[in-house]
Amino acid sequence: MNSELTRLFDEPSPEFSPAPLWWWSGEKVTPERLTEQLEQLAGQGVKNVVVINLAPAGPMVGAASDDPLWFSEEWWDRFADACEICERLGMRIWFYDQIGFSGANLQGRLTQDHPEYAGATLHRTELKVSADGRVAVPPLATPVAAYDADGRRIALGDDGRLVDGEATPETPVTLTYTLRTAYDYLSPEACDALRDLVHGEFERRMPERLGRVIAGSFQDELPMHNSWTPRLSEEFTKRRGYDLLDVLPALWAPEATEDGAKVLGDYYRTRAELAEEAFFRPLGEWHSRYGMLVGADQLNPARGGQPIQATQFYSDYFRTHRWFGAAGSDHEGDIKVHSSMAHLYGHDRVWCESFHSSGWGGTLEDTYDWLLPFFQSGATLYNPHAVYYSMRGGWFEWAPPSTDWRQPYWGAVRTVRPGRLTDLLDAQLGHAGVRRRRAAPGGHGPGPASAGRPGRPQLRRRRPRPGVRSPLPTPDPVPGVGRPEQLVPPPPRCAARGRGRVRHRRRGLASAGRPRGRVDRNRRAVLPVGRTARLRGTGDRDRPLSARTPGRRRPGGAARRTALGSRGTLRRRRAGPADRRTPAGPDHRQPRRTSPSADRRDPAAALLRPGAGPREGLGGCGLRPGRLPERLPLPPA
């Protein structure tokens, strides 16, 4: 066996160890306790931590204010203490940027002082011209343009008066207008101010630690892009060569005109370019300048690979997130999508945040089984949710477990060490056993196939199976333009058989004991049964899932069991006798319901609620997205 591979297996690189979310909440953070907890983590081979605050600016989700408050002088002192301890222990520390899921309200604070930083959403409505030649502009709305029944643009004043006077009273017109929303992610000035508020402060206070002990930052559930900004029409004309306002109604009905699909595609292309230039590229370049990574787990269903919602949320998910060195998802998303993104743009790391709200009963064996499908799909950075600084007050129960010294299996964590797999998978390999393309100079965009990182082993490419195209990237890609990843063999399917026996059909392996996690034919990881899990961001499915569904049994007495897929899908399968030994969870009697509070926590929840009707707006607000169109055409390829 390759001696270098053996070395990597025995002693994986610290950078590939798990990077748990380390919540500084619940009790006062002290240097002594930081030292104790970091030594516990380092002793079991956990060499990365992601510092995150639950209540950074005050009480939140039932938790008292963090002590110290995020970004206070005392917080900076504790973060410096943590950096010193990590440096001594050979660990790396990440910071959470509080731009996405957060109680810091950074965007709100900025727009309060700078109202011009607020974004806008685009809407339309059908009206009739009044007797004085006006149209009734909705409250708080800013009119954009008006159109007659034939789609011809009519000049419109700020007060709603039709300037050219051609429309007679009671004539129907289509009015397009904007409403203010949370933040303008298409404005360079607004995004520069937001980035300076967080990343700029790290640069001013501890530049010598960036890229050394500070490995990067993590962003969770960035709010969706605003669909309009004051400069969008002008930029559209410059970049596409025609006036968007002349054809604006085509955004809602592209099939109604000959060039409707082109207009819709040009709109999203322009919006993606503005978002990339204002927010994503500067953020990625800031991290690259210090040799750091930016990890991300964005809103569902964009992270689940749903093309329509991903386009609505982030304009062009691949184009914008190619600047993130470790884009990924949690266990409700689709790792394969982000693995393809990493292959396409030459990145090494694929973030995998798991397993939020999977319950307190999971064992180390369960966790390892749950992880295997994600590793198989290309995950190379395991981000456990979570390690809690304190469990006082009970607030931590909203997202169990705490994967740390509080678990009975803690002493065996070093034996498993998922960093072994992520290190080996990244040793110039893709998850399918082929070399990855390395990044071009600057760390972004597709580059040529790597000759290998110095000191890391080169493994042979596996011969593709008959009839399956190799996933090896096409050589000599066009600069700045990525190519779709080719087909790769599907992962082996597993099934529960007999007395709790799991048989890997293709590999001819069998293992006895309780059924483990598996992968279905759509590459969705199915968690093992016998655990209590909570679906997040799925509207009516936001409810606890128990080990078995009470009152429903198949012939022969075997209970129907419920499992949670990586995309938030529910899957049922027949349970063997070994399953019946697992007691049901405590929450199995709770009724199936829609949770409005969950919709407020996760903007995507409202999108997936049954019966959510369409609305006229394109895009939405990161805090209150409302309901987006159920069907919105995608831009042409």
Image (tube, rainbow, N blue to C red):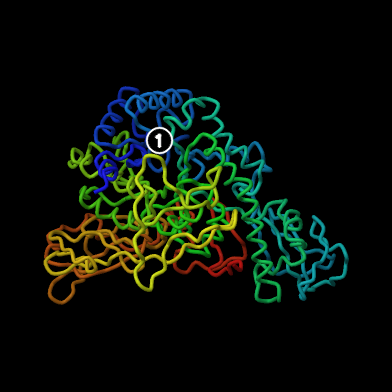
- In the rendered view of the protein, which quadrant contains the C terminus? bottom right
Residue 494 falls in image quadrant: bottom left
* Side of 567 where 250 appears, left or right: right
Residue of label 1:
51
Position in image of residue 316 (x %, y %): 57, 58
Depth check, front residue: 168 or 441: 441
The residue under the point 64% across, 59% down is 269
The image shows residue 116 at horizontal and vertical percentages of: 69, 43
* Above or below: residue 221 compared with residue 469: above
Q: Amino acid at mark 1?
A: Val
Q: Residue at x 19, y 61 (%)?
A: 515
Q: Does the rendering let one see residue 189?
A: yes
101 or 156, which is in the foreground?
101
Looking at the rendered structure, the secondary structure element under dot 1 is strand
Q: How many marks?
A: 1
Within 10 Å of disc 1 (Cα), the crowding (few <14, some 14-19, many 20+) is: many
Q: Is residue 623 visible?
A: no
Which is nearer the eye, 547 or 95?
Answer: 95
Q: Position of residue 581 (x, y in %)?
A: 12, 60
Q: Position of residue 297 (x, y in %)?
A: 44, 50
Q: Residue at x 55, y 39 (%)?
A: 106
